[in-house]
Image: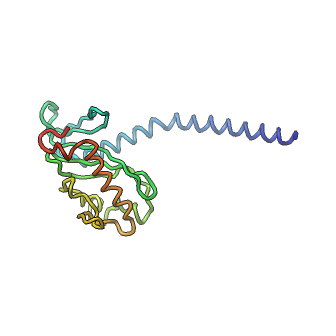
Amino acid sequence: MKNILKLSFILGCFCIAAAFSLAGVNKITKPRIELERKKAINNALKFVLPYAKTITENKTPDDKIYYSGFSTEDTTQSPTGYAFITYGQGYSSRIQTMVGIDNEGIIQAISILFQQETPGLGAKATEIKPGEETPWFQQQFEGKSPVDIKVDKDGGEIVSITGATITSRTVTTSIQKGFDLLSLKKKVGRHLF
């Protein structure tokens, strides 16, 4: 019994030390992680809203975040486009996608911000082929309207990633849900939000 108490006390001390160590590491790395996240979002915004010189963050009445892109630094003019982030559960991770659209609701570009899908299969969603500058899977979305976003296996124009239909469907359905949540399908025209 004496040994069990001694071992329990030692194990408890190690657990407390590990908890404090993890809390310290978290405190040190959290600002850096947040900085990298913001940097990734800014880079994606520049990619999906290429004609925007100024981009502002906005919220819908129900607190959903979207971005407005302006062709000049004057944000009192009408935006030239909009962007939003959408999420969907893929095969092995939650996929986060930035979508940029013009005033007519046509997709300008998409950028997958985060995914941890299976290497060689679902991870091909971010693969850039030799000689190209952007991922081939993501290029397919350019110029599409919300109603055109379906994978080929569901009768759409988006070619699925071979062996990764779940990942392909996740990206397309999450974009559809993003349009639905922000009521973009109904308000296509001069003022989307």
* Residue 159: image location, x then y, percent: 28, 66
**Quarter of the figure that contains the C terminus:** top left
- On the picture, is 3 further left or further right than 161? right
On screen, residue 130 above or below 96: below
Q: Which of 72 and 96 is in front in this view?
A: 96
On screen, residue 7 above or below 61: below
- On the picture, is 32 further left or further right than 58? right
- Seen at 61% across and 37% down, the residue is 21
Q: Which of 60 and 102 is in front in this view?
A: 60
**Quarter of the figure that contains the N terminus:** top right
Q: Which of 143 and 113 is in front in this view?
A: 143
* Residue 114: image location, x then y, percent: 39, 50
On screen, residue 66 above or below 176: above
* Residue 156: image location, x then y, percent: 24, 64
Q: Which of 115 and 154 is in front in this view?
A: 154
Could you say which quadrant of the image residue 20 lies in?
A: top right
